[in-house]
Every structure is written in structure tokens, then in C-alpha cells.
Amino acid sequence: MSVSTDESFYQRIGGEPAVSAAVTALYRVILADDRLAGYFAGVDLDRLSGHMVALLSRVLGGPDAYSGRDLRGAHRHLGVTAAHYDLVGAYLIGILAGLGVDDEVLGAVRGVLEASADEVID
């Protein structure tokens, strides 16, 4: 019996429990930040968190269960600034690092954040 060395980033960080923990921590930090909390007024956070878990799972090579809108459609009405986008990205990277995620995975997440910026920033 052999163990595969081709684990996805999703598997390497601990799968769904780790992604869920990261998303829970991310929204806790975002909602505590007065610069960001307003974006989430009146939002169903349980639903949004579920979408974020599915999206982050897909990004990390896990299950592709994301059924939400595309990034542009989900964010175009919010007027997200580059500074706020960067702040959320920094929070996500910090949370993942705090959970023990390795530099290779963090670099890949940074790459996705950079590549996705134009879809989210107004």
C-alpha cells in the first residue's frame, strides 16, 4: 500500500474542517473591523459563510460544490475598494498562516487573490 504524495492543498491543510475554521475566523475578524463590517449589513452570514467555504475549498483543489454567483456579479453592487480587498486578503492569509498552513499554499492563495482582484474591486 502506498500513500499518494499528490495531495491537493485542500487535503494538506486538513480539508473541510480546516476551511470551515478559516472562514469562521475570517468573518469574525471582518465583522469586528469597522472598515469592513458595513459590507455585510443585512447579509445572511450563514449562507455567505457556506458559499465562502465552498469557494475556498474549490480554490484549494477540494470539492467543487460552489453554486454562488460569479465574483463580479456577487460584488459589483458593493463598491469594494482596493484597500478593503487587500485588507480582507491580508486577514485571510494571516488566518491561514495562524492555522499552520504552509508557505506554498499561502503563495497559491495570494496568487488567486491577485488574479481575482479585478472581479471584486469596483
Image: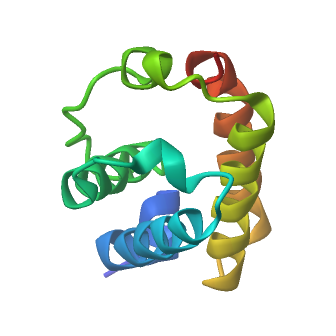
Quadrant housing the C terminus? top right
Q: Position of residue 15 (x, y in %)?
A: 36, 71
Residue 107 is left or right of residue 121, and the answer is right
> Residue visible at 41% across and 73% down?
24
In the drawing, does residue 53 fall left or right of residue 98? left
Tell me the quarter of the image containing the N terminus.
bottom left
Q: Is residue 10 above or below residue 117?
A: below
Say which quarter of the image contains residue 118: top right
At horizontal 74% and vertical 46% (from top left) the residue drawn is 110
Percent position of residue 120, x then y:
57, 24
Relative image position of residue 103 (x, y in whole percent): 79, 66
* Left or right of 78 on screen, residue 41: left
Q: Does the rendering let one see residue 7?
A: no
Pick the residue in front: 107 or 80: 80
Q: Position of residue 16 (x, y in %)?
A: 31, 70
**Colour scheme of the picture:** rainbow
Left or right position of 112 against 40: right
